[in-house]
Image: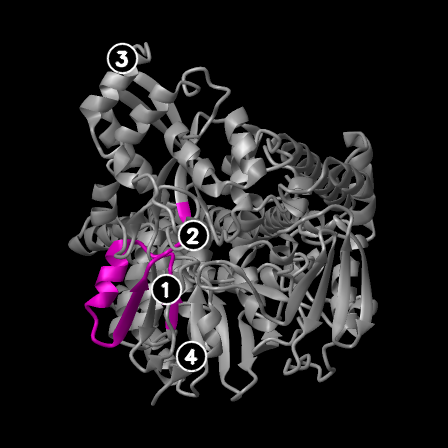
Amino acid sequence: MRGIILFNRTLLAVVLGLFFLIPISSATSVEPTPQSREIVFAIGNMPLNLDPRYATDAASERVNRLLYQSLVDFDAQSKPAPHLATWLETSPTEYQFTLKQNRAPFHHDKPLNAQDVKATYDSFLTLKDSPHAAEFTNIQNITVLDDDTLIFKLKQADKHFPAKLLIGILPADLISKNHDFSHQPVGNGAIKFSNWQNKLSLLRIKDGQKMSLIEVKDPTVRVLKLLHGEVDLLQGELPPELVKHLQSKPEITVKTGKGANFSYLGLNFNDPMLKNVKVRLAIAHAINRSAMIDKVMIENSRIADQILPPEHYTNQGFSHPSPDDYDYNPAKAKQLLLEAGVKLPLKLVYKTSTDAQRVRFATIMQAQMAPAGIALEIRSLDWGTFFADVKAGNFQIYGLTWVGIKTPEIYAKAFGSQNFPPNGFNRGRYADVELDALLAKEDWQAATTRIHNQLPYIPLWYEGQFAAMRKEISNYSPKSDGNWDDLATISVGK
Amino acid sequence: MTGEVVLLIKKITNFATVIFGVLLLTFLLIHLVPGDPVEVMLGESASTADRTALRADLGLNQPLITQFGSYLNKLAHGDFGQSIHTKTPIIDMLKTRYPATVKLAMLSLLIGIFIGVPMGIYAALKANHWQDIMVTLISVRLSAMPAFWLGPMLMLIFAVWLGWLPVSGMESRTSIILPALTLGFGLSAILTRMTRTSLLEVLNDDYIRTARAKGLDEKTVILRHALRAALLPIITIVGLQMGSLLAGTVITETIFSWDGIGRLLVESIEKRDYPVTQACVLVVALSYVLVNLVTDMLYRLADPRVKFGS
């Protein structure tokens, strides 16, 4: 009996010891929060590929904007603007680019010249698997006149050609050596690549400020890491309740701003029901966008009417149809459905991803549509299956967001009848001769009005942008398209 | 001995058959799910000619059987290919991801064993007393806590409130503790109940009474006689759990930003990065088969009456 008691005590000691041992040992070895003042930025998804000729995901493109410089960028109104070079349209099929004099050298200390530009764009001819190669098939040849000047000769006239030259310039000597830019990027941007193991380490050239990007998938964990001081900065990809929680913390600064990424409901025009404009109008009137923005979105989110936001240059100087034309009015929606000869309830299937916030939106819309006589069935699919279904036209309604769109050509790509997948982004297979004519004339005012009235998409909102940072972080603000350009200026105090 | 060699050969044959089956099934399933690697690589704006050219370049225009043969041939030469998205050789990805999973799995298993087995013994010795009820309650509570809840709770307590450990990541030596505890607690609950049940079955057996009658001290009776006899079901559970831990614990790896094989597998499926998916499934299958083999060997060590391979 005594033996049993002794044995029990031993067991208890082992169990309790294990519990106590862990905190004690860890307390002595836990690493300090970043006091060396490397700025740590937690992101939801790591960049996939830092070669600008391959990068398509948002994270890679945002980092590449810092590592490389392109010939052209966009100004505040999204007009193409000189970045590394100015240009002159010498003929409808010929553009002369002149590199700016005060351009930075590459990070491996070689100067950047016109040969590097030519090598970068010429390399698309040999890359069979670049997702951007199709953009440059119209280039007939590139002629270098001198170190600063080169001419792009096109096969066909394209007055939007400069707006396509957004690819970061790579050094010609490394292109010829088949350098692995995907994992060892060398550009001439404000930030230089240092290392990429578990985290992506970067170095700002002007002052040697170190920064690192770490992937933290779970939004709650990103918030906990920020509160604990393990990270200094977060941007986007948090549900509004977590943003509100951060706003209540004295050690955290939350900055918000207007967004320009357009969320919408896509409709399938092969579906006989959805072909009827009255049904589409009914769906628009069955969604209470204002309530959703007020209750489940972060501040500075705003109702959208078209893909490009009001501040875009194509939207300046003329009055637009109001987004309020499609206010929440279930009675009107029901009336429209009856006029369209629909037997109520109208059963529709809505496909979305598994993202928690997207599923939440879908659930709210399902409830909002019910009084209008629309029975919305939600199918939440993993991203690969969902997007494959969207491209294949295997849907009735889906929800997606256009991210970082700057050029008005998106209207042709998204709604032009020649742009059904796989030849474009007209995933709803919308065909409208009148709209095609307006798009061909590039009459953006008339085209957007036509789109507003015909509703090939149900426009939802431009989601607000935000960044949350430790109090000691300054000179960083969220941008409307969610880019991370302010990493070039961010600073950290004591 | 000869019989055992034959059985070993049988085991290895079974091993090869299972792996071949897994490879074939994965290959076929991947071709059934929606999504196209060429579409993933070239995006939506590529021309049909470019798509056709790349499809031919990758051999995707070949009959499935030819593609499978070519895949097996590359595997036989140790060539897993490269990721569609990151262009990284897959072997390099596996070299970093798999050891991380093994490290986490081993520590979780140790925590599970060190908590679960002693608690199970204690509960068995105190069967039907309040201590037994308490242990049962604790183990039920632990097994009822999903990783997506327990993980953030541990982070909140040990990282944010107490500041003892990092929230997540792999930068610090101590980063492994919280994910290992998250997995280990769940495992310990299973082992507690299994140990208690197995031990109770043998504690009233004649040979235990004999051992006590010989005057052996209680510690020896429990640890050397009773526990050894109760080990077989515990080894089975440990083997099964180890297999699933080595397959990667997606939720825990995701919550704790632990770059393991489970997370890599799920991400590759989401992104339709087929070569990575195939390689991960192969590694997971190999892990399961190897763990089963080791479990069989441990049976024999625990109970010499068990014939290897029987």
| Tag 3 secondary structure | helix
Q: Which mark is residue A490?
A: 4
**Residue under label 3:** A338
| Tag 2 secondary structure | helix
Disc 4 versus disc 3: distance between alpha carbons?
A: 57 Å
**Residue under label 2:** B251
Tell me residue A274's x, y (percent): 41, 21
Q: In this view of the protein, can residue A403 be seen by the observer? A: yes
Q: Are marks 2 and 4 in contact (CB under 8 Å)?
A: no
Tell me residue A465's x, y (percent): 35, 59
User: Which amino acid lies under the numbered mark 2 shown in the image of this protein?
Assistant: Ile
Asked if the magenta segment contains residue A234, the reply would be yes
Task: Please identify, in this view, whether the residue under mark 2 or under mark 4 is nearer the observer.
Answer: 4
Disc 2 versus disc 4: distance between alpha carbons?
A: 33 Å
Task: Please identify, in this view, whether the residue under mark 4 or under mark 3 is nearer the observer.
Answer: 3
Q: Check the image and report above or below for A301 versus A184.
A: above
